[in-house]
Image: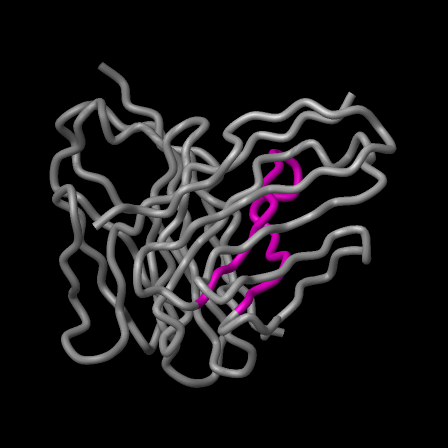
């Protein structure tokens, strides 16, 4: 079974631009969670989607948004990029009935200049 | 608030020596417990999990962990480390209320030849 895939793997953007990251979960998984990982802050939870609905949300500004499609694929969007948004963005999928057992993709490395 | 503590930021171990990484959590009920490993620039890989039952759980790559309710701990062990085990290790705890994993800050494992 294929693992979680994330595209693109690397991205360089300029302050003020917006970016969309994509995540395809493991087949059969209905829950997708997004995390931001930085050296200073560690792993921080952004949001979790289940059956196209946002089920849980972390403490991030409204510039960070996401959505999930009927095939469980998910996207996250960051508008008006700031230098501090430079990070590794990780997507994880789970079956949904136990959302804690999460399987991670390789991440998207976003650099904001 | 629930929290997960990994008291050691870095641990250095000689190749072939035994390893124990510590994880303590604060949570009233028996939580779901996980250990993940992350190689540089990569996503997180699930090493092992504890939901209930036998408190000693076996994982991949020769790792095991023991749940001790009285100490609120879930320490990760390996009898003999290999240079390929050099990575960062994260402990995570699932809480029922909002489908969110609570993460430790991670322990970076350095292997001495």
**Magenta part of the chain:** A31-49
Residue A38 among magenta residues: yes
Residue A38 in the image: x percent, y percent?
A: 62, 37
For this view, does B58 lie left or right of residue B109? left
Residue A108 in the image: x percent, y percent?
A: 54, 34
Residue B62 in the image: x percent, y percent?
A: 12, 44
Q: Nearer the viewer, residue A17 or B93?
A: A17
Q: Name the residue: 23% across, 40% down.
A: B19
A95 lies above or below A20: below
For this view, does B90 lie left or right of residue A82? left
| Quadrant where the image shows the C terminus of chain B | top left
B10 lies above or below B101: above
The residue sitting at the top extreme is B113
For this view, does A51 lie left or right of residue B69? right
What colouring does the structure picture have?
one colour
Residue B65 among magenta residues: no
Q: Nearer the viewer, residue B70 or B111?
A: B111
Residue B97 in the image: x percent, y percent?
A: 54, 83
């Amino acid at each position: 079974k294929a693992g979680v895939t994330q595209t693109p793997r690397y991205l360089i953007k300029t302050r003020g631009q917006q970016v969309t990251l994509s995540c395809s979960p493991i087949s059969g998984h209905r829950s997708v969670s997004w995390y931001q990982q930085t050296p200073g802050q560690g792993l921080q939870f952004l949001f979790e989607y289940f059956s196209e609905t946002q089920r849980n949300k972390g403490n991030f500004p409204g510039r960070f948004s996401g959505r999930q499609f009927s095939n469980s694929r998910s996207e996250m969007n960051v508008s008006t990029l700031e230098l501090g948004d430079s990070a590794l963005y990780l997507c994880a999928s789970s079956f949904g009935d136990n959302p804690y057992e999460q399987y991670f993709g390789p991440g998207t490395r976003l650099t904001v200049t | 608030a629930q929290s997960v503590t990994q008291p050691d930021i870095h641990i250095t171990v000689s190749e072939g020596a035994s390893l124990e990484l510590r994880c303590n959590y604060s949570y009233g009920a028996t939580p779901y417990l996980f250990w993940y490993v992350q190689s540089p620039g990569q996503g997180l890989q699930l090493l092992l999990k504890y939901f209930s039952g036998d408190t000693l759980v076996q994982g991949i790559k020769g790792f095991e962990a023991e749940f001790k309710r009285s100490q609120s701990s879930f320490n990760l062990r390996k009898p003999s480390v290999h240079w390929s085990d050099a990575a960062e290790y994260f402990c995570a705890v699932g809480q029922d209320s909002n489908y969110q994993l609570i993460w430790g800050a991670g322990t970076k494992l350095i292997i001495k030849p």
